[in-house]
Amino acid sequence: MSDVAIRVEDLSKTYRIELGRARYETLREALVHGAMKPVSFVRRRFAGGDGKVSDEHLVAALRGVSFELPQGQVLGLIGHNGAGKTTLLKILSRITEPSGGHAEIRGRVGSLLEVGTGFHPELTGRENVFLNGAILGMTKREIERKFDDIVAFADVERFVDTPVKRYSTGMHMRLAFAVAAFLEPEILLVDEVLAVGDAAFQRRCLGKMGEVRNEGRTVVLVSHNLAAIEALADRAIWLGSGRVVEDSDPHSCVTRYLSAQRGDGHTAALGDGVLSSVRIFDPEHPGSSAIRTGSAVCIEATITLRSALAYPRLRYELHSSRGVFVATLDTWLQLPMEEYPERLEAGIHRIATTIPMLNLVPDRYHVGVRVMAHRDVVEEIQDAFVLEVEEGDFFGTGRPPRTHHGVAALEAHWDLESTP
Amino acid sequence: MDASERIAGTSRVEEPSSGADIPVTRIEPTRGWASLQLGELWRYRELLYFLTWRDIKVRYKQTALGASWAIIQPFFTMIVFSLFFGHLARIPSEGIPYPIFSYAALVPWTFFANGLNLASNSLVQNSNMISKVYFPRLAMPIATVLGGAVDFALAFLVLLAMMLYYGIAPGAEAVVVVPLFLLAFATALGVGLWLSALNVRYRDIRYAVPFLVQFWLFATPIAYPSNLLHEPWRTLFGLNPMAGVVEGFRWALLGAGTSPGPMIAASVAASVIILVSGAFYFRRLERSFADEI
């Protein structure tokens, strides 16, 4: 049992939430209420007396979570917002106390709920590295030893003695992450830090995390980036409403998590904004609802305008179910200048976007839509609808490209030239 | 599981035999009064050092006058006091020139008032740290009050210069200033602990502190000498710990005639009670800081 790094037994956490504040109709009411506050406070304290709060004001963030994590294992935590992932990390890193159950941790814990905690804008990069390092639990000597590596990793050598308030957002993030990346505790708790930074830097961070895995360190990783969880974790736990829904290997856990998310057909009604609805169909087989790899796809957006729109621009962004940004469809990118409409008048417009041969592997793609006027965003709906792609005979070989073949199917010619 | 590990609270217990330096942390709900965990605070002394250092570095950043603010505050208050209380109201000053009589009291007072004020807001001001990382929360108000020590030293240099100007040479009793400074520190921290913990739940504290400091200023013999009161009231006056500190400073540095011994004893007792109760109260509320801040 000594190689168990984290043991969690029946852990629960309830938060007290503040009661919905009363709305005041008039200034007079607000003033009266404000003036009565000390009185009602004293009355509550001394009259009702026992200080207990009725159940309605309690919200359970965790309800009886149990698991054991052997030393050296990387655990991925997945689940919707509010499922209790961050609460679990906060309890394990001792930021907050559980309401019931217990946990036992063997080893020095480093937690990373946020990068750059305690960074002070007036202090220089060098000073912030020391301050942030100390906050994350590093000793002064440890920071001195790693200082040059940290600064080199963040790529800010020239600015170490500049106050960080003069840094660009990117430099700031890189420096903050670099300090965290050099944290060497036996147990590392990480919350959604991969969501920050530019793509290239993210890749480097993932690489650094990969090293962590090779060093045999125990890691608990929370991320919405399911691809990262699959790539880095040895095991995944899916939390739903504060309970363990599934505890298994990352691939099957992620797959089951994704399939549990309700599909919403192929037409999305988008409310009463500018974008009224979006419809996806196969123009060659309008009756069938399935979209396959290799078939034609038409996306038809209905836009209702109350006033004219100058230099209208429509953009779709596709993300795979694992969070990978796959493709962009954009009028500005794809329409030749002479075909570009300068103006859309008030009224209802249908804009059909046709992809003659869809070369995406089977998956559920989340599509975000954005309507713009020149550079201004008129309306943006992230996750507007889901494009479900099924297996299709893209290559005409009877062997369809599958999800594990990557993101895209590419048409190619193969030539063989042999010399005896 | 080893029986010795079953200690209430989120405690760290070193393994007795095997796996020599693997610390085991047990996390479970705690209730009621918690121990102060001073050992853990000691393990985090480097963080305490860095937090203090940050407070000192940042204090006068982007101000035109910089660290001179540490001197301006007590010095100008002294001028105003000398003008109104010394010159116009002719308040007695035990035969000592009124400017140095009030300044000697304003130096520890300014340290106390600023420390109390900043400590009360320290948790709320650093709410991000409280909700994102673990560290013994006591470190926050302690570092904040410690950060004022530099200001105190600067203002104290001016006091020495004034003593030179007025030709006042202190005797060996001047060393008492050191424990008196600690007394002021303990009092500022003690009250700061109470108020900073309360401030997490009731932001009213932020508005109440300036009032409190103002009342406390007049309840402390800064503009007037404490011998306006007769015994035993004078000794009882010492229950305001700052009264003991201020009178002690005058006695140790300016050779003020009245020996403030009993008064300081009362101040020490009051200060210890405030500090210890504040620390325990702070620890009791600490477990909900991250949820409520």
Image (cartoon, coloured by chain):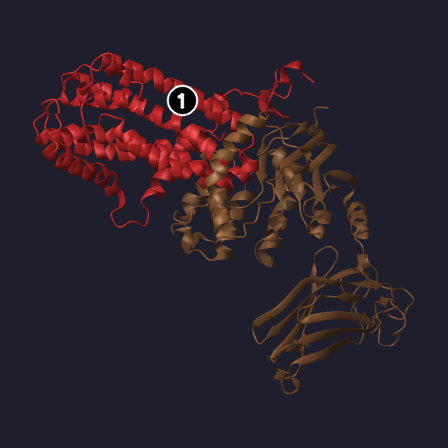
Chain colours: A brown, B red
* Residue A384 picture location, percent across and down: 71, 63
For badge 1, the amino acid type reads Leu
Is residue B197 in sight in this rendering? yes
Residue at the limit of the structure toward the bottom, as seen here: A338
| Point 14% across, 30% down: residue | B100
| Point 90% across, 72% down: residue | A287
Towards the viewer: A172 or B201? B201
- Mark 1 is surrounded, within 10 Å at the Cα level, by few (under 14), some (14 to 19) or many (20 or more) other residues, namely many
Q: In the visual, does A18 lie left or right of B215?
A: right
| Point 8% across, 32% down: residue | B165
* Residue B171 picture location, percent across and down: 14, 18
Instruction: Provide the residue designation for mark 1.
Output: B275
Q: In the visual, does A158 lie left or right of A382?
A: left
From the viewer's perspective, is residue B47 above or below residue A201?
above
Residue at the limit of the structure toward the right, as seen here: A398
From the viewer's perspective, is residue A393 above or below residue A112?
below
From the viewer's perspective, is residue A319 above or below residue B9?
below
The N terminus of chain B - image quarter: top right
Towards the viewer: A312 or A257? A312
